[in-house]
Image: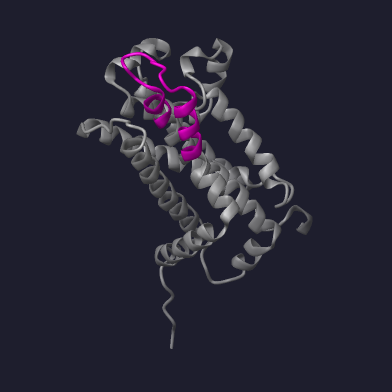
């Protein structure tokens, strides 16, 4: 009598539930990845309290979209880069590879984790920004449609890049030390911690090659007044170009991940 195994999608969804439970049990990872943007939003709102960034935009309003973009990047790129490297180092990937579970189910579980944590983090950050910091939440349907595709492209590209980058750390213990500086550097040059238009021209040019800049700029188009776009380089939100860059990184991440991903440690041969 043949046994019918559940589909890879069904197993992947079940794996998502397990991944989410494990994520919330890791207190250090939860605080750094999940609450980091929220803490920094509160700090910047206090430090720059009373500052007018143009068109009546205060500090809390200006930094909210950058922190949303940063949160997406943390829960996708950084979280997957670190956790997959640690799981590989602990031979968890090797053991999973030896089970009937399809590799597709494993990656569905990881991407499902990113989606769940990103949505929860966004909801919490938006609630704090709106209720405690006085940020006006947009009501126009077109802005939320823009948010949807920016969010999907941002989480997708961040996830595949995180999976690909997970092979860079030489060990699980070194993963955070390797990944965190990369994320911090991108945050500083992408308009997350500073007003993007005030950054040096060479820094803006460098940031344009990476997805976080376009993710942050896209989020500003959603949460800042339409007239604020004149303060952006080029005088517009450049949503079309941002979509192309994020899509390009998604394709590059997929191709690189398929080519370089390893289920075993380097010293395993």
Q: Between residue 142 and residue 11, name the one nearer to us.
A: 142
Q: Position of residue 225 (x, y in %)?
A: 29, 21
For the question of whether residue 257 can be seen, the reply is no
Q: Between residue 263 and residue 71, name the one nearer to us.
A: 71
Left or right for 54, reference 268: left
The answer to whether residue 179 is magenta is: no
Quadrant of image for the C terminus: bottom right
The answer to whether residue 53 is magenta is: yes
Where 158 falls versus 203 (above or below)?
below
Q: Position of residue 236 (x, y in %)?
A: 35, 15
Query: Residue at the location (52% across, 36% down)?
Result: 252
Query: Residue at the location (41% across, 24% down)?
Result: 59
Q: Between residue 23 and residue 82, name the one nearer to us.
A: 23
Residue reaching furthest to the bottom: 1
Residue reaching furthest to the right: 267
Left or right for 234, reference 98: left
Q: Position of residue 44 (x, y in %)?
A: 48, 28
Q: Between residue 136 and residue 181, name the one nearer to us.
A: 136
Where 98 falls versus 194 (above or below)?
below
Where 251 falls versus 34 (above or below)?
above
For the question of whether residue 177 can be seen, the reply is yes
* Main secondary-structure element of the magenta-colored stretch: helix
Query: Residue at the location (20% across, 34% down)?
Result: 141
Quadrant of image for the N terminus: bottom left
Left or right for 34, reference 89: left
Q: Position of residue 125 (x, y in %)?
A: 40, 41
Range of residues picked out in magenta: 37-64
């Amino acid at each position: 009598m043949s046994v019918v195994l559940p589909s890879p999608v069904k197993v992947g969804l079940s794996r998502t539930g397990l991944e989410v439970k494990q994520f919330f049990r890791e207190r250090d990872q939860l605080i750094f990845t999940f609450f980091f943007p929220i803490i920094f939003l509160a700090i910047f709102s206090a430090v720059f309290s009373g500052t007018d960034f143009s068109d009546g935009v205060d500090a809390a309003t200006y930094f909210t979209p950058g922190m949303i973009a940063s949160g997406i990047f943390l829960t996708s790129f950084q979280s997957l880069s670190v956790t997959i490297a640690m799981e590989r180092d602990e031979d968890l990937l090797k053991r999973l590879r030896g089970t009937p579970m399809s590799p597709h189910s494993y990656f569905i579980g990881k991407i499902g984790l990113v989606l769940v944590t990103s949505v929860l983090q966004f909801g919490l950050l938006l609630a704090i920004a709106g209720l405690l910091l006085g940020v006006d939440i947009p009501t126009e349907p077109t802005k939320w449609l823009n948010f949807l595709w920016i969010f999907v492209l941002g989480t997708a590209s961040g996830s595949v890049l995180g999976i690909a980058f997970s092979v860079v750390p030489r060990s699980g213990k070194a993963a955070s030390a390797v990944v965190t500086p990369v994320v911090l550097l991108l945050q500083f040059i992408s308009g997350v911690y500073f007003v993007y238009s005030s950054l040096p021209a060479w820094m803006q040019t460098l940031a344009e090659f990476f997805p976080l800049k376009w993710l942050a700029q896209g989020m500003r188009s959603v949460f800042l007044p339409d007239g604020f776009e004149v303060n952006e380089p080029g005088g517009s939100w450049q949503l079309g170009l941002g979509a192309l860059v994020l899509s390009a990184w998604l394709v590059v991440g997929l191709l690189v991940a398929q080519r370089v991903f390893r289920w075993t440690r380097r010293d395993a041969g």
